[in-house]
Image (cartoon, rainbow, N blue to C red):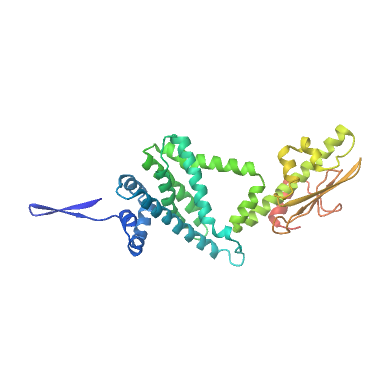
Amino acid sequence: MPGVRRHKGQFQEIITMPTPLYIWEESNEIRGFMKALPRLSFNILFKPVVFFKELTLSGSVDTKKRLLRAALFAFLFGYLKLFIDLSFLAGVVPNFALFFLRPVINFLVTLALVTTSVKLILGFDKLLVPAFLVVCYRSAAEIFYCIPVFGAVFAGVWGIALLAVGIKEVYYSSMVRAVLAAAIMPFIMLLFVFLSLGPAANRVVVTLYPEARKQVVKLNDMNAYLYVSSIAAGAQAYKKDLGFYPSHLGALKKYIGGAVSEDVTNPDNATGYVYEYTRGDDDHFTLFARPLEELYSGRFVFYTDETGAVRLNAPQGEVIRSLKDMESLIMTGAS
């Protein structure tokens, strides 16, 4: 344990000062280790190299106890962040347990991404206990969510920096490989998951982050416009090939692509919109795209037919002529 050495005449007096990490891990009294929490957090945030080096060198604590204390630290700061989030969600706090499990879910997702990245970047022979500790203690960055306006960005960047420094120190790796394992590879994996889920990912995001609902609704609106445009073009190509319009949307898979076809025919309406296609006869069809839950999953009604024009609300509605028009519509929110 680190200490200071003082000289007293010809004798040498060694005074050992327990560090905040030592107290946090070793103390058996709640008051004792909680008293060390502020200093421990300060060291993690502003002396991360020193802290993570101490974490690797200090090996006297029982492993189970060390892991439990690290997890406790992570959840203390995770629920502190949730409390901060709740202060910005007055009146729209969801009434279900999943939202209040958000800190646990966030932790598990981060842990899964980082540990997988450590194996991929640093080697499959690496133990994952150090990565677990790093993920737990980087939670100290959640305190920055208290900062108005830029708190989320500040906390996110600081948290990634702590992950990178922690992985570098506990695995004795280069900073380049640490950044790859802490930030770049997890981002790539998360992006792959969201692209695989498609618009269904929006529902997951809204469930856990209701404050992001406005942005998700805008994404749903844009996707609905693009899907309606794609269906109109696909139906026209179908008629050109076969001489008549299809009887249902599933027949357009070849013309609009498998991903779009699955989204617009999804029985759970994961895109936030319901697509109502009707074939009149060989030469006519109509298509409406309506929000599954108005204002909650989307804000507009889109209409198209054999003319290929995408309109708002009805056959006589305003024509949306380009993506630029749609972007303006989304920004103003007018319907």
Above-or-below relation of 211 to 170: below
Q: How many numbered discs sit on the rendered protein?
A: 0
Q: Please tell me in which quadrant of the rendered image residue 264 appears.
A: top right
Residue 188: x and y, percent? 55, 40
The answer to whether residue 72 shows anywhere in this view is yes
Is 295 on the left-hand or right-hand side of 35?
A: right
Query: At 42% across and 42% down in the image, what residue appears?
Result: 128
- Specify the farthest residue to the top: 241
Is 244 on the left-hand or right-hand side of 291?
A: right
Q: Quadrant of the C terminus?
A: bottom right
The answer to whether residue 322 shows anywhere in this view is no
Residue 112: x and y, percent? 50, 44
Residue 263: x and y, percent? 72, 45
- Specify the farthest residue to the bottom: 91
Residue 158: x and y, percent? 45, 50
- Specify the farthest residue to the left: 10
Query: At 25% across and 50% down in the image, what residue appears?
Result: 2
Query: At 83% across and 35% down in the image, what residue appears?
Result: 237
Above-or-below relation of 117 to 44: above
